[in-house]
């Protein structure tokens, strides 16, 4: 790519929001390290229900509460110990397999037929890192690793959206706990995966910010693809609204602009009408009072 890594200035309000979220993440991470109580998830169903529709398959082998097998003296030169803890490795494989069959909640809630799985989303993000040629100042391999790891916790807790009634703080805590349980199955290699997950969540490195852009890019591209496939142009406007103004990398911004231009041209040619406004629950409101009816924010629907 010819575009430089330098992103356009972020509005002060967005910077403040990101700083607050970063502080929350650090606090939760410290609590987990001190083994303080964390919100729990159902190991038998391995999911959080967003509605009557399940978006995560049942787990046939829940995480064991026993300590993971230790390689001890059998490990040489930092290589994984494949002659011990084989059952844990198979369990790790099964958890990764969950991602191949778990549908992304946002599409399920909008009754999208034959919608993508979590692993399908992660795979396209990973492939997009091949577009990097080194001129952007980004580590292409690290970006690929971040993309492959960023939603790994969803193999246990499911794909949590604002419509699930879970606060942001609780979501972070549940995903961190899930990652600890997943990574301990393949120690010492699990530490590398946990480091990548934490890097993505913190969003401090250039690579993590780029991969977050890919996360949002893949979502709007997927929304556009479903609109074309199902002949329902503009139906998934809420997914475009939720990412508006949040892209940072210049090249990703150009791709999003191209998607919007193609989408608007098709909508105009077919005489598509904007959908009704969608009210999205405010996850921040749940942080202070889980018993209170969640506040909502209304997304706008615009066409050009």
Image (cartoon, rainbow, N blue to C red):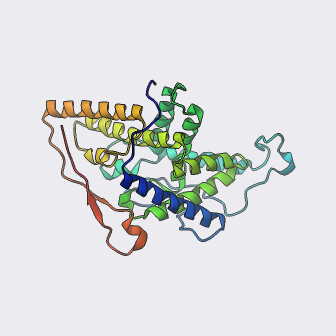
Residue 51 seen in render: no
Residue 246 seen in render: yes
The residue under the point 54% across, 33% down is: 138
127 relative to 79, above or below: above
Q: Quadrant of residue 216?
A: top left
Q: Is residue 219 left or right of residue 177?
A: left
The quadrant in which the C terminus is found is top left
The residue under the point 26% across, 38% down is: 227
Total labels: the figure holds 0
Q: Nearer the viewer, residue 12 or 21?
A: 12
Q: Quadrant of residue 263?
A: top left
User: Residue 222 appears at what percent x and percent y?
Assistant: 35, 38
56 relative to 117, above or below: below
Q: Nearer the viewer, residue 33 or 122?
A: 33
**Furthest-left residue in this view:** 271
Q: Nearer the viewer, residue 26 or 103?
A: 26
138 relative to 10, above or below: above
Q: Is residue 188 left or right of residue 137?
A: right
Q: Nearer the viewer, residue 27 or 147?
A: 27
User: Residue 111 appears at what percent x and percent y?
Assistant: 30, 49
User: Residue 132 appears at what percent x and percent y?
Assistant: 51, 28
Q: Quadrant of residue 112?
A: top left
The residue under the point 82% across, 44% down is: 75
Q: Is residue 297 left or right of residue 276?
A: right
User: Residue 246 appears at what percent x and percent y?
Assistant: 37, 45
């Amino acid at each position: 790519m010819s575009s430089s890594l330098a992103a356009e200035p972020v509005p002060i309000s967005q910077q403040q929001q990101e700083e607050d979220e970063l502080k929350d993440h650090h606090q939760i991470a410290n609590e987990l390290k001190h083994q303080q109580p964390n919100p729990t998830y159902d190991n038998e169903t391995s999911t959080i229900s967003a509605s009557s529709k399940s978006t995560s398959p049942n787990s046939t082998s829940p995480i064991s509460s026993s300590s993971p097998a230790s390689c001890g003296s059998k490990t040489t030169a930092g290589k994984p110990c494949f002659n011990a803890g084989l059952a844990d490795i198979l369990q790790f494989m099964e958890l990764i397999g969950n991602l191949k069959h778990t549908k992304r909640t946002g599409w399920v809630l909008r009754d999208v037929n034959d919608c993508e799985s979590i692993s399908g989303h992660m795979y396209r993000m990973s492939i997009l890192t091949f577009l990097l040629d080194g001129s952007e100042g980004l580590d292409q391999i690290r970006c690929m690793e971040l993309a492959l790891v960023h939603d790994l916790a969803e193999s246990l807790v499911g794909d949590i959206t604002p419509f699930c009634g879970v606060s942001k703080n609780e979501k972070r805590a549940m995903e961190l706990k899930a990652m600890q349980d997943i990574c301990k199955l393949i120690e010492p290699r699990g530490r590398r995966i946990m480091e990548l997950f934490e890097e993505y969540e913190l969003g401090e490195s250039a690579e993590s910010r780029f991969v977050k852009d890919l996360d949002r890019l893949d979502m709007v591209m997927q929304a556009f693809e479903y609109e074309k496939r199902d002949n329902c142009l503009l139906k998934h406007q809420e997914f475009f609204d939720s990412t508006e103004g949040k892209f940072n990398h210049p090249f990703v911004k150009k791709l999003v602009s191209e998607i919007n231009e193609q989408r608007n041209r098709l909508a105009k040619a077919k005489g598509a009408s904007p959908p009704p406004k969608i009210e999205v629950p405010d996850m921040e409101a749940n942080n202070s009072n889980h018993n209170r009816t969640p506040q909502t924010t209304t997304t706008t629907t615009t066409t050009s």
